[in-house]
């Protein structure tokens, strides 16, 4: 199983600040997903990045896939209290035929009003 | 309609008991999974089934036995429950044949063993 390291593990910021969450691996993934999980719920997909160097934007969220497809970042601009939650990156190594997502340990984000 | 539904949402039981968690998906996906999320929120895969066949069985005690009667259902049966089994268990599904494996998760079953 390939490993994904997420940092930081915890992040507490004031409303309006910017932040970046990192997801790193020594392995190559065919694609990488970012999920957000709220208390009492299952993770919900935010975005999938597939191509090395790809950048995707979802309103104030910007996702980037590293050129070598081993790492990714999530940047949030002007964070809002509604952004509070657990952010999980997950690598798809189904290219090896294993049909599975490997999750990072998550970044717990708290945005204080 | 809920895409991936699992029951029960909460389960409190004594050590040594046997319990089951049910999962159903109405997305027409080929692949279903069971994940365990521990108290530190680490989400770790337990099993993966593709078209009712076991694909992945990570290092999980054999007290855990998944059963897939059809590709829309993947139930999890746990024998002789132990305190360390307390966690949130998530069922998920995906269309593994697509170019990227996006998983849709159920709401989770919070299992507490006392």
Image (spheres, coloured by chain):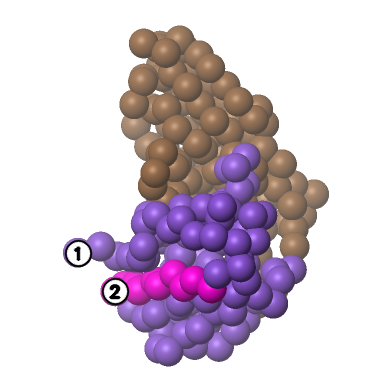
Q: Main secondary structure of the magenta part?
A: strand
The disc placed on residue B1 is: 1
> Judging from the image, what is the letter of the chain drawn in brown?
A
Query: Which residue is label 2 attached to?
Result: B26
Q: Residue at (58%, 33%) from the top-left corner? A: A107
State the residue in front, A88 or B111: B111
| Circle 1/circle 2 CB separation < 8 Å | yes
Q: Distance between the residues labelled 1 and 2?
A: 8 Å
Residue B113 picture quarter? bottom right
Name the spot of residue B41 as percent of width and height, x first: 58, 43
A86 above or below B53?
A: above
State the residue in front, B69 or A20: B69
Query: Is residue B44 visible from the viewing direction of this image?
Result: no
The disc placed on residue A60 is: none
Name the spot of residue A95 as percent of width and height, x first: 65, 71
* Element assignment for label 2: loop
Q: Which chain carries label 2?
A: B
Q: Quadrant of the N terminus of chain A?
A: bottom right
Q: Residue at (65%, 27%) from the top-left corner? A: A8
Q: Residue at (40%, 72%) from the top-left corner? A: B22
> Judging from the image, what is the letter of the chain drawn in purple?
B
* Element assignment for label 1: loop
A88 above or below A84?
A: below
The magenta segment is B18-27
Q: Quadrant of the C terminus of chain A?
A: top left
Name the spot of residue B51 as percent of width and height, x first: 48, 87
């Amino acid at each position: 199983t390939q490993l994904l390291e997420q940092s930081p593990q915890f992040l507490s910021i004031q409303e309006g600040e910017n932040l970046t969450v990192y997801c790193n691996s020594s392995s190559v993934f065919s694609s990488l997903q970012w999920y957000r999980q709220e208390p009492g719920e299952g993770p919900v997909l935010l975005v999938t990045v597939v191509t090395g160097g790809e950048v995707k934007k979802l309103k104030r969220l910007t996702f980037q896939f590293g050129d070598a497809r081993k790492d990714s970042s999530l940047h949030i601009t002007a964070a809002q209290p509604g952004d509070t939650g657990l952010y999980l990156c997950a690598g798809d190594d189904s290219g090896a035929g294993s049909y599975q997502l490997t999750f990072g340990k998550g970044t717990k984000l708290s945005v204080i009003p | 309609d809920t895409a991936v539904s699992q029951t029960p949402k909460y389960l409190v039981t004594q050590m040594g008991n046997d319990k089951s968690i049910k999962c159903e998906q109405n997305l027409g996906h080929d692949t279903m999974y069971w994940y365990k999320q521990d108290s530190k929120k680490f989400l770790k895969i337990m099993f993966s089934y593709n078209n009712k066949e076991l694909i992945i069985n990570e290092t999980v005690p054999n007290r855990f036995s998944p059963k897939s009667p059809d590709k829309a259902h993947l139930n999890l049966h746990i024998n002789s429950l132990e305190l360390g089994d307390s966690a949130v268990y998530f069922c998920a599904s995906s269309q593994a044949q697509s170019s990227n494996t996006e998983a849709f998760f159920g709401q989770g079953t919070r299992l507490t063993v006392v």
